[in-house]
Image (cartoon, coloured by chain):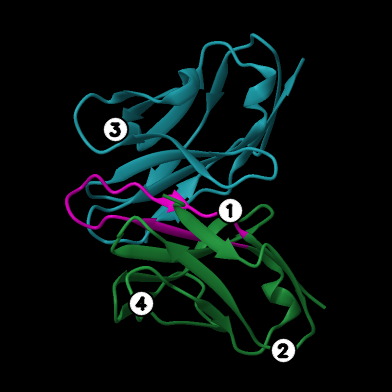
Chain colours: A green, B cyan
Amino acid sequence: NAGVTQTPKFQVLKTGQSMTLQCAQDMNHEYMSWYRQDPGMGLRLIHYSVGAGITDQGEVPNGYNVSRSTTEDFPLRLLSAAPSQTSVYFCASSWTSGVQETQYFGPGTRLLVL
Amino acid sequence: AQSVSQHNHHVILSEAASLELGCNYSYGGTVNLFWYVQYPGQHLQLLLKYFSGDPLVKGIKGFEAEFIKSKFSFNLRKPSVQWSDTAEYFCAVNAPGTYKYIFGTGTRLKVLA
């Protein structure tokens, strides 16, 4: 199993550009989520999904869109990039059944918005 | 609203010293508790987790944590740190079945050889 994969590893954007961060998992996990990591602020939840076709907002959803058309993929879209979106983005996945919910994280995407 | 506080932002220790990192959470109901570690340049890895039962939880690499419900705390401990423990440590909490995980701001640990 590859686990949770993310592409690209690093991206530079200009203000106003759009892009999609890709996330895929091969563990058949129902739950997937996106976080951003900023110095001194830990990880903050952007959006999450509990299954194909079901998404919901996290703590900091503004400026980001998500969709979940398959169990495996959960892309994060930046509609019009802003310097405040410079961050490291992590995707995570887990089971949703039962109480033994442990998240598995991807390697991250480092985004710089100029 | 749930919140997680990690009061130690930076910790510097010498090898073989004992470690205790504080984690306090704010939530009135049942919670799941986690400690994650992020080594330099790597993604987050689960160190240990508490869902129920014995409040003293043992994880990987000699780490353990104790859940003290009355203090809303889940402190991470290791009796003797190694240089390879240099990393950032995150405490996290979620209410079972809610799918919203709240992370603390992290503690950067540097272990001097």
- The residue stretch that appears in magenta: A89-108
Q: Which mark is residue A107?
A: 1
Task: Kindly report the distance in space between the C-alpha atoms of the residues bearing marks 1 and 4.
Answer: 23 Å
Task: Name the quadrant containing residue A58.
Answer: bottom left
- As drawn, the label of residue A29 is none
Residue B83 among those drawn in magenta = no
Residue neighbourhood size for the residue with mark 1, other residues' Cα within 10 Å, grouped as few (<14), some (14–19), many (≥20): some
For the view shown, which residue lies furthest in the right direction?
A114
Badge 2: chain ID: A
Q: Please name which of the two marks, 1 or 4, marks the residue nearer to the observer.
A: 1
Q: Nearer the viewer, residue B69 or B103?
A: B103
Question: Are the residues flagged by discs 3 and 2 in contact, CB closer than 8 Å?
Answer: no
Query: Pointer 2: what residue?
Result: A17
Is mark 1 in CB contact (under 8 Å) with mark 3?
A: no
Report which residue position mark 4 lands on.
Answer: A56
**How many residues crowd around disc 2 within 10 Å: few (fewer than 14), some, or many (20 or more)?**
few
- Is label 1 or label 2 in front? 1
At label 3, the amino acid type is Ser
Discs 4 and 3 carry the same chain letter = no
Q: Local crowd at mark 4 within 10 Å, few (<14), some, or many (≥20)?
A: some
| Amino acid type indicated by mark 1 | Pro
